[in-house]
Image: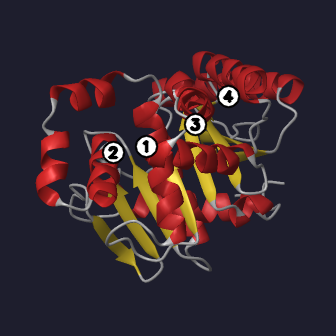
Amino acid sequence: MSRSLLDRQLIVVTGKGGVGKSAIAAAIGSVIASRRRVLVLEVDPRENVHQLFGAPPSGGEFVELAPRLHLQNLRPGQVLDQLVREKLKLERLARRVLESPIYRHFAAGAPGLEEMAVLGHALRVLRGEAPKAPGADVVVLDAPATGHGVSMLAAPTLVSEVIEKGPIGSMTREVADLVGDPARTGIVVVTLAEEMPVTEALELRETLSERLKREPDLLVVNGLYPPVARATGRGELFELWKRRRAVNERELGRLDREWPEARAELPLLPLGRGVELVAGLSDALRQSLEGGAP
């Protein structure tokens, strides 16, 4: 199952903040780009994924990272505004609508609308309908952390129940079909082998099952300390290493008991945040998905 994940059209990556979610999204995109065209889509307004690739900030534009790999930082409001412009066609009329307080209140306050807009943008990129978008066979979405990530996945169904007609109603039904199809959309949860991140990952799995009737396709356990079974040494750093690895092993045992789906385990790499880190994680992830040891 974890290997077939790479054949999906949309891969949503979520997890607790601080577990390396963005780095794993970048690594997944890099692995898939060896054979398919990929867009890594970031929705964090702080915009930091470009640093992982050593590229300039996106600022909403598509940035080419490699021949089959692009990056975009997306503001959800941009998608809704663009949809208005496309449907009204006349710029003067579109501008009046976009400047209207009623539209602004609706766009900012409607539950699930901005989240649905992000997924709708991903669908349009896959179809080649998004303006200036590069050709893409798969979109890797660096989604918001944990609970917000679930809300994003649930948004198309929520919005489709409220808005049934017009261009937004049509888009929400199509996006709901995309997100709800396990053959087209994969869900990746990222965690560290530590108590709080593992607890949150297990809760996320339960929430996905309850709200979306879906199980995650892959759990990525990031940042594992090396085993110390055969190592000898002394001093504070050695003792810290042993303690951190003991925590890792305890939480890995917990996942053995409570997480039945596919799992990839990635080592803690002595690399700063940047291109080398993504390359190292990509190699480790590729080997893990192919059944080997990183």
| Distance (Cα) linking label 2 and label 1 | 6 Å
Specify the quadrant of the image occupied by residue 255.
top right
Q: Determine the residue positioned at 31% across, 67% down.
A: 62
Q: Determine the residue positioned at 31% across, 26% down.
A: 106
Amino acid at the residue labelled 4: Asn
Within 10 Å of disc 3 (Cα), the crowding (few <14, some 14-19, many 20+) is: many
* Mark toward the viewer: 4 or 2: 2
- Name the residue that disc number 1 marks: 117
Q: Determine the residue positioned at 66% across, 25% down.
A: 201
- Name the residue that disc number 4 marks: 248
| Distance (Cα) linking label 2 and label 3 | 14 Å
- Name the residue that disc number 3 marks: 156
Q: Is residue 70 above or below residue 51?
A: below
Closest to the observer, 277 or 35:
35
Amino acid at the residue labelled 2: Leu
Across and down, in percent, residue 242 comes to: 63, 27
* Mark toward the viewer: 1 or 4: 1
Q: Is residue 10 above or below residue 132?
A: above
- Name the residue that disc number 2 marks: 80
Q: From the image, which quarter does the N terminus lie in?
A: bottom right
Q: From the image, which quarter does the C terminus lie in?
A: bottom right
Which of the two discs, 4 and 3, labels the residue nearer the N terminus?
A: 3
